[in-house]
Amino acid sequence: MATIRDVAKLAGVSVATISRYLNKNGYVNEDTKLKVQQAIKTLQYEPNAIARGLAGRKTGTIALIFPDITNPFFAELARAVEDVARMYGYTVILCNSDNQADKEQTYIKVLKQRYVDGILFASYNLRSDDVEALKNEKIPLVILDRAPRDASCSVVSSKHLEGAQMAVQHLMDVGCKKIAHIYGPQETVTGRERFIGYEQSVKHLPWYSPSLVEPGHFRVDGGMAAVENLMQRHPDIDGIFAGNDMMAIGALKKLQRMGLSVPDQVALVGFDGIDLTLIVEPEITTVAQPIYDMGMLSTRLLIKKIEGDIQEEQTHLFDVNLITRGSTERKRTDE
Ligand code: RIB
């Protein structure tokens, strides 16, 4: 297999000239171009993508690191990232960190060695010094979804706190008199901001008690366990806001197993807007994030960074919207 050195020797030029020609990042006169093209043809040289990456760090690949491959939210995000990346000639390496910081650090190390052109982080273990280290290594990155709010790089997310307030307000609008919250991991900015949105909406109300919240770990089984504990503590709960759709699906399953009707006895709202909320009965009202748009924008921002379009680090927060469905369509009892 011919190497870049073989081509340089045959063309009678330096390896640097070949690298400039291949990566289009420097002047090569027409005469030299012809000699290089002829040498590449004669030797049937295939520039090694990694080697090319070493020269101009242009491997045509980006990486997406996300925390939970089993959650459809991240599948939809990955779909958008791949669609946009492919449009611009990039391939995507998908990295599932399983919410584990050490696994994420391993990915970062491997990706640096593979010279990917840029990294999208949809995770939350990324510390500010990680961001600084990657920036010092000149590896373009964009954080999406669970960004630390003090991140010194571009962030794409949605309005979690406002979305939580919309969920609680809707439950009140359909007549709920005692509303509980199943919250996501508080080390994630998404879980924490939705918790704050719930608390700000209810903590001044006479029925509020701190025992009206329960963790659900953003998982179906977490939503099921949370409902059991909440209903044991407060059998008169008639509204539940779950901090993501997977927990809402678990909550629905548990409520129905307990013989409680949704929405008439307990109304239920989720968060994310994943399609799974449509296949359960009743369908679940949810605060939908523009997942595909978030994936598209973050990928576009990353590719602009990779291709030298220096833009100041920005935070883009998308609006969310309430999609009302059967899990809150209650007959108003106080009408
Ligand atoms: O469902 C997974 C959750 O983790 C989503 O709400 C998303 O915002 C991410 O933070």
Image: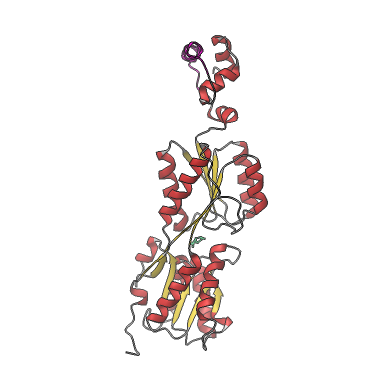
As for residue 237 lying within the magenta part, the answer is: no
187 shown above or below 299: below
Viewer-proximal residue, 58 or 251?
58
Name the main secondary structure of what is drawn in magenta. Answer: helix
x and y percentages locating residue 267 in the rendered image:
40, 79
x and y percentages locating residue 227 in the rendered image:
50, 77
Q: Quadrant of residue 260?
A: bottom left
Viewer-proximal residue, 245 or 90?
90
Q: What residue do we see at 55% from left, 14% from top? A: 7
294 shown above or below 30: below
Viewer-proximal residue, 232 or 168?
168
Q: Is residue 267 visible?
A: no
x and y percentages locating residue 115 in the rendered image:
58, 36
Q: Which residues are magenta?
A: 28-47
Which image quadrant: the N terminus?
top right
x and y percentages locating residue 62 in the rendered image:
51, 41
